Amino acid sequence: MSENIQAVNDANFEADVVEASKTQPVMVDFWADWCRPCHMLTPTVEELAKEHAGKLKVVKLNVDENINAAGKFNIRGIPTLLIFKGGQVADQLVGAQPKESIEKVIQRHIS
């Protein structure tokens, strides 16, 4: 995982995502090790994390190891990106999206 991306889990999700999103938008990458599209999306997510460092917190959550958080937010397909703002889900992208699509969604929340 890159220096701009932190791994989160069921235990710290509330503090590191929900609470943190009250001061800065947080993008969560829901993924699993067996998911090829998840691996294809990883370099894009890392680029976005680096480009928006200081304006957007980016974290990854392995859905196989953390079923509570994935279940709570009705993650049905992966990869799924959720953007949290003000303690709530503000946006959702499902599937391996092109960088431009993700960037457009991020811009709505950081500008």
Image (cartoon, helix red, strand yellow):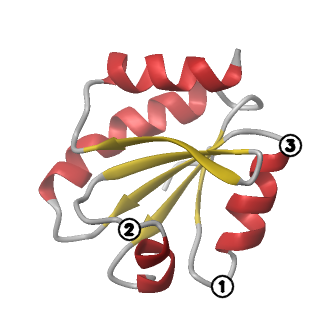
Q: Which comes before the other along the chain, label 1 or label 2?
A: 1
**Foreground residue among 108 and 79:** 108
Local secondary structure at mark 1: loop
Q: Which residue is mark 3?
A: 23
Question: In this view, which residue lies farthest toward the right?
Answer: 23
Q: Which residue is mark 2?
A: 74
Q: Please, what is the three-letter code of the amino acid marked with disc 1?
A: Ala
Q: Residue at x 25, y 70 (%)?
A: 33
Tell me: 19 left or right of 69: right
Query: Pointer 2 and pointer 3: residues touching (CB < 8 Å)?
Result: no
Q: Please, what is the three-letter code of the amino acid marked with disc 2?
A: Asn
Alpha carbon of mark 2 to alpha carbon of mark 3: how far? Answer: 24 Å
Q: Nearer the viewer, mark 2 or mark 3?
A: 2
Q: Quadrant of the C terminus?
A: top right
**Residue 97 in picture, x, y percent from top left:** 25, 32
**Residue 91 in picture, x, y percent from top left:** 50, 39
Q: Residue at x 48, y 84 (%)?
A: 68
Alpha carbon of mark 1 to alpha carbon of mark 2: how far? Answer: 18 Å
Classify mark 3: residues with Cα within 10 Å, few (<14), some (14-19) or many (20+): few
Q: Please, what is the three-letter code of the amino acid marked with disc 3?
A: Thr
Q: Which comes before the other along the chain, label 1 or label 3?
A: 1
Classify mark 2: residues with Cα within 10 Å, few (<14), some (14-19) or many (20+): few
Q: Residue at x 35, y 38 (%)?
A: 43
Alpha carbon of mark 1 to alpha carbon of mark 3: how far? Answer: 20 Å
Tell me: 5 left or right of 92: right
Classify mark 1: residues with Cα within 10 Å, few (<14), some (14-19) or many (20+): few
Q: Which comes before the other along the chain, label 2 or label 3?
A: 3
Q: Which mark is residue 11?
A: 1
Q: Residue at x 59, y 19 (%)?
A: 108
